[in-house]
Amino acid sequence: MSPEHLRHLLDRLREGEVSTEEVLSRLQTFSFEDVGFAKIDHHRRIRNGHPEVIYGEGKTPGQVAEIFARLADRNPNVLCTRASPAAAEAVRAKVPEARYHELCRLLELRRDPAEPVGYVALAAAGTSDLPVAEEGALALEVLGSRVERLYDVGVAGIHRLFAHADELRKAHVVVAVAGMEGALPSVVAGLVDVPVIAVPTSVGYGASFGGITALLAMLNSCASGISVVNIDNGFGAAYQADMINKLACRGRKGGES
């Protein structure tokens, strides 16, 4: 339940339209909703600012659809990552306005009309990294952050990255996505004075070890200001970037530097 719904319920209690017992009963269901195969956390938006995000991999299409629909009943925006085409079809049977992005396997419902805030730059080294990058970019947009996509700017042609230096320096936070040797975040961190979130991808030949080489390179970067998420975790980077971006916006509104 959103803060607006909670306020409306309390207003109805004050006006005598609902009883104290009914309010208590409704409040007791806010913690989670037990649907047998899942306990849906409807309280998360109140605690964390965003509703629970569904991880689709390993769930049946029916399970994904049921959780998605129940979240959609109480939230304007809903996200499901790693969703299969079959899961997307099942969700859209229940929630027709949901959109599926096949490249990154992300399902979204976006009904909040609010304008995106702040500025996050999302840089991806190569076209092969786009499934992970787009998972992050779309998640950021659904969460409410403004995103600038800077794609195919890997260090093998570093002039392509330098051509976007101004966009990088204007950002509140940069997400840098790279496979192979994972060098992009180190270069980006040497150009900007904001946090850089590094996302290693599983892209690469045999010695990349499914992204472990990029992960270790990012963890061992000599550039300061880099944090690293797990391999192919575009959503995790997006959530962290959204929080940093909104903290920066809040600081500016408060007159802080």
Image (cartoon, grey):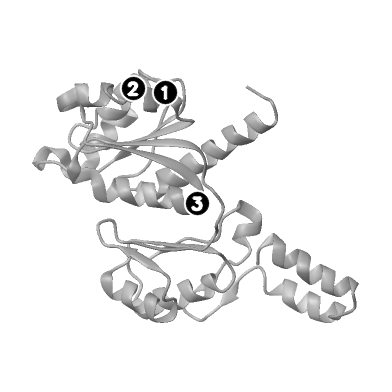
Do residues under tags 2 and 1 come within 8 Å of each other at their CB atoms? yes
Residue found 86% across the figure and 74% down from its top: 13
Residue that carries the numbered disc 1 in the rendered image: 169
Q: Which mark is residue 165?
A: 2
Mark 1 or mark 3, which has the lower sequence index?
A: 3
Task: Decide: few, some or many residues near mark 3? Use Cα within 10 Å; few <14, some 14-19, many ≥20.
Answer: many
Q: Is residue 33 visible?
A: yes
Q: Which mark is residue 25?
A: none
Task: Decide: few, some or many residues near mark 1? Use Cα within 10 Å; few <14, some 14-19, many ≥20.
Answer: some
- Residue 165 picture location, percent across and down: 33, 22
Residue found 63% across the figure and 63% down from its top: 43
Give the quadrant of residue 73: bottom right
What separation in Å lies between label 1 and label 3 (alpha carbons)? 22 Å
- The quadrant of the image that shows the C terminus is top right
Q: Which mark is residue 143?
A: 3
What separation in Å lies between label 2 and label 3 (alpha carbons)? 25 Å
- Residue 106 picture location, percent across and down: 34, 60
Badge nearest the viewer, 2 or 3 = 2
- Residue 180 picture location, percent across and down: 17, 36
Residue 79 or residue 208, whichever sits in front:
79
